């Protein structure tokens, strides 16, 4: 097991380096085309933002989805960066919306930009946020171009382009639900699952996998692969929520208080309220506080554990992973890649960041 | 001449109605697919924003570009709404960036949303702007889907999708130049022309025309048509600037002081500064003022006329239109559509809104 682990972690690292090299070369090309200082500066910043960290889970899944049905080929790396550019697009906009100055442990796009503007710049805050909105929109165009120019057949490429638009569309609906959730007291587990399906499962796992599968040109039925992606995506989100509360701040690159301070109604919170009605008021108070103190935070974490909510999330996660793997078994594809995807399903809920 | 005018204006109206019907049906389909209240509400607002006015110049040009090389066909109407959805995407983001509460004489997207939220909503302003950013991103996905699902061949559709991404990309660079222009004292006529080429000419005229031409599947050389579009697009922007200063507020749907208050360095301003150096300080003061009074505004308009800057813009516009028409002559396409495009070139610089 130890050896297999190392083998697949090396696989992840190797693919990640491929994706990084392709991203570098894409941005170099874009930078060379810039005709003026401001464009060059902003495109350079989109490059730095994109290159700074990121586990490249999405493009690696696109490559894996392709490898299930077709031999490896450099074109899939070219296409795979598309979803990573989409990621930059959405994260840059997200940070403006959340007014978040930190991303992956470093200044967010607009925060870094704001600090680089002369102090006497008129409305520096607004200006940097505006430039960030345009930068996000640019990254989105890049994402579309990366697929369109990857060199695959017209039919496959077109379907994939359309799928990417649909992924971004559903991420948008997820965003709306997410923004609304903070205002909506009746926000239920069902709403939450839909939010996760759209904002995480489709966007992070199912969509990227399917993009790769479609680009392979396979005529095989992709329904089981799609289920694998959706179920694993839900598990991915639950693990994110667990790490967001109990993870190591240095490893996850953000404060463990963030989710609570943002008032996120995670499954951990919803179930703690349900399982421990006496603590419901306290939990809601914590979520509405915006700046929780150490003592309350510790008490909140204790309640989530003692109420059984933590165990519920862990159990749900494990069930989702088992179910997703059982769908994977019925996929008629390359056995080596299936081995990787099987390992990857376990990795998703054991990862530390 | 009178008859021709009416004929082509009717043509514009007829095509506009087709585009509107297609947009309505697209949004109905999207609304039906919404699973929750917040998505339904936001998609309904994107629909209302899109349906509220708009001359549909861009989709009409896409239809004309198609008709140059192919008989009319409902699929081109389906594809043409794509650029109008892109327009909604960019305008919604624009109004957030400009913090503008008015668009087409009505509340802008985020302003209307803000007013509909309960007064005691936490940070109503931010919330409505965030929802507007997501709404813009959604409209962008719709734009990509509208082309992908219009029913044309894979090859043509894919090239058009890529072209749309490129149009939006260059609009982004234009935006960056635009944002930068307000801060840049050395902003020159050359910078301005590049800004107009990207932000207006490609996006409003050349791009939409080329999208239609490409969808027709023609193998003919499209270079002359592209030049027609770019030159006419520059003229379109100059006429916009003239209307922005001397137009009728009711007809143009915004205050004639807007451009000045936004500090826009239009060709009218750049040339007035150049032709009348004694007034340069006054003009710069007006552009930096942010809230010009009636007296200064009248004096500014007088200077633009007396300095010869106004005539310079008009002359430049006319030259651009003549040049664009001469390129049109060399396009080997349907003669009826060419007649329309010839008329349209003159219409662009005589229009009142």
Image (spheres, coloured by chain):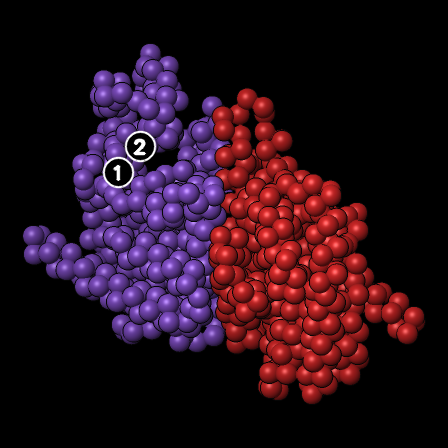
Chain colours: A red, B purple
Quarter placement of the C terminus of chain A: bottom right
Residue found 73% across the figure and 50% down from its top: A299
Total label count? 2
Which of A193 and A15 lies nearest the eye of the viewer?
Answer: A193
Q: Chain of mark 2?
A: B
CA separation, marks 2 and 1? Answer: 7 Å
Q: Where the N terminus of chain A falls, by quadrant? A: bottom right
Secondary structure type for disc 1: loop
Q: Which residue is mark 2?
A: B258
In the displayed structure, would residue A222 be above or below residue B1? below
- Asked if badges 2 and 1 are on one and the same chain, I answer yes
Q: Against B324, is B241 above or below?
A: above
* Residue B192, quarter of picture: top left
SS class of the residue under badge 2?
helix
Disc 2 crowd, CA 10 A, few/some/many (<14, 14-19, 20+): some
Q: Residue at x 25, y 43 (%)?
A: B105
The residue under label 1 is B254
Callout 2 touching callout 1 (CB < 8 Å): yes
Q: Name the foreground residue: A230 vs B3.
A: A230
Q: Position of residue A34 (x, y in %)?
A: 56, 43
Query: Which residue shows up at 36% across the image and 57% down it?
Result: B46
In the drawing, does residue A106 fall left or right of residue B79?
right
At which x and y percent is residue B126? Answer: 47, 42
Q: Label 1 is found on which chain of the structure?
A: B
């Amino acid at each position: 097991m130890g050896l297999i682990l190392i083998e697949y972690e090396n696989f992840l690292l190797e693919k990640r380096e491929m994706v990084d090299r392709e991203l570098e070369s894409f941005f170099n090309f874009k930078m060379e085309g810039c005709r003026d200082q401001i464009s060059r500066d902003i495109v350079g910043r989109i490059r730095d933002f994109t290159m700074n960290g990121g586990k490249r889970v999405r493009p690696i899944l696109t490559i894996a989805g392709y490898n299930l049905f077709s031999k490896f080929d450099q074109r899939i790396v070219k296409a795979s960066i598309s979803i990573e550019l989409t990621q930059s697009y959405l994260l840059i906009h997200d940070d403006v919306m959340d007014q978040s100055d930190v991303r992956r442990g470093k200044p967010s796009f607009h925060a870094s930009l704001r600090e680089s503007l002369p102090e006497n710049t008129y409305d520096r805050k607004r200006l940097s946020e505006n430039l960030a909105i345009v930068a996000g929109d640019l990254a989105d165009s890049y994402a579309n171009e990366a697929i369109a120019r990857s060199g695959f057949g017209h039919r496959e490429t077109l379907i994939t382009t359309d799928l990417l638009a649909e992924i971004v569309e559903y991420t948008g609906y997820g965003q709306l639900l997410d923004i609304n959730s903070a205002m909506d007291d009746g926000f239920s587990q069902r709403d939450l699952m839909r939010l996760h399906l759209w904002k995480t499962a489709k966007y992070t796992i199912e969509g990227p996998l399917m993009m790769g599968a479609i680009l392979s040109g396979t005529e095989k039925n992709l329904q089981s692969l799609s289920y694998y992606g959706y179920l694993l995506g839900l598990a991915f989100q639950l693990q994110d929520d667990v790490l967001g509360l109990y993870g190591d701040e240095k490893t996850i690159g953000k404060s463990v208080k963030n989710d609570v301070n943002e008032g996120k109604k995670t499954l951990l919170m919803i179930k703690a309220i349900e399982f421990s009605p006496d603590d419901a008021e306290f939990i809601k108070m914590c979520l509405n506080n915006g700046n929780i103190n150490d003592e309350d935070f510790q008490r909140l974490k204790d309640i989530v554990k003692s109420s059984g909510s933590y165990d519920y999330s862990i159990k749900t996660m494990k069930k989702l992973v088992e179910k997703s793997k059982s769908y994977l078994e019925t996929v008629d594809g390359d056995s080596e890649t299936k081995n990787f995807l099987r390992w990857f399903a376990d990795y998703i809920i054991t990862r530390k960041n």
